[in-house]
Amino acid sequence: VATQEGDAIFVECLLFVCRQIQHKQQHFRRNLMKDLETTCAIANDFFKMMESTEKVIQELTVKYPHLNWDEVTEEKNPKTGALNRNFADLVTLFEKDAVFAAEQLQMFVFRAINTSDIPRNMFSRDWEEKFVHNQVALSLVKTIEDFLYDIDDYLCSDYLLGKTCTSLIQATVCFYVQCLVQKAEAVRHKRRTRKSPKSPRATTPTGPNRNANDELRFPFLNASRAGDRMMYDLEIIESYFFSLVDQVPALSRTV
């Protein structure tokens, strides 16, 4: 490229290619996220495409310094200025899409959790009376840990892994709260559909003499014990995510 006309054609071609890549990326990026492994691969691809685009920009500025990449603006030179802006937008687009794919991995993790016994057992009578060592919370953490072990192998960047871990923390909190809300809604439904006890001074039943209606009417047999169980559940979950801080320091701001 040695002439003004040649520069204009060169810049126009680059601008066309850049805009076409943006168009394809925006229209097809989310259609590929079918499962965990594929979504990991997509996150890696987008992240590497971001790095490659940055490298291309650096090589162009070195090879064609006469185009004044750092100084040009769209007011002074509309074509080269537009190319600068479109390259910057493309880098940002690839980064955002890589992060989005990494954050979407929690969806596949909790899809498996939601089809397991964990939601059914969480805040159940067994959770309160039988699973005295917080086995349900431990099962939840173990499932997340197993998935995260594979995700760590698949993802090419600690930056993406950090985004996945952050989304997993948020999804775990939402899952736990959702289970509690569903428990409350189930009790509320039973209260609406079943007759209330004759005595207006009914209290929370305890011991072997409670009846089936009481078990359906009251959320927990012992509110204090249920509160302790929740506290230890949260300690188990928090402890697990804190254990990841050494590998992903940014998590210390989230946990």
Image (spheres, rainbow, N blue to C red):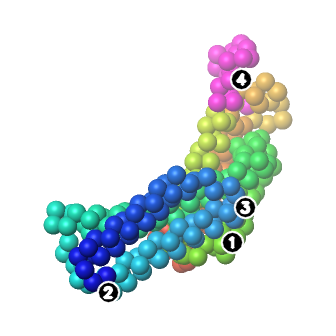
Which amino acid is tagged 3? Answer: Thr
Q: In this picture, is 120 found above or below 143?
A: above
| Left or right position of 215 against 92 | right
Mark toward the viewer: 1 or 4: 1
Question: How far apart are the alpha carbons under marks 2 and 4?
Answer: 72 Å
Q: Position of residue 114 (x, y in %)?
A: 72, 47
The amino acid beneath tag 4 is: Lys
Q: Are marks 2 and 3 in contact (CB under 8 Å)?
A: no
The alpha-carbon separation of the residues under discs 2 and 3 comes to 49 Å
Residue 249 vertical placement versus 16 (above, below): below
Mark positioned earlier in the residue sequence (2 or 3): 2
Determine which residue is flagged by label 3: 143
Question: Badge 2: few (under 14), some or many (20 or more) residues near its Cα, within 10 Å?
Answer: few
| Image quadrant containing the N terminus | bottom left
Disc nearer the start of the sequence (1/2)? 2
Residue located beneath label 4 in the image: 190
The span shown in magenta is 185-205
Per the image, the residue denoted by label 2 is 62
Residue under the image location 63 percent in, 68 percent down: 41
Circle 1 residues within 10 Å: few <14, some 14–19, many ≥20: few
Label 3 environment density (alpha carbons within 10 Å; few <14, some 14–19, many ≥20): some
Give above or below for 182 relative to 20: above
Q: Earlier in the sequence, mark 1 or mark 4?
A: 1
Amino acid tagged 2? Val
Q: Based on the displayed image, in which of its 4 quarters is residue 238 positioned?
A: bottom right
Q: Are marks 4 and 3 in contact (CB under 8 Å)?
A: no
Picture coordinates of residue 86, whole percent (x, y): 35, 63
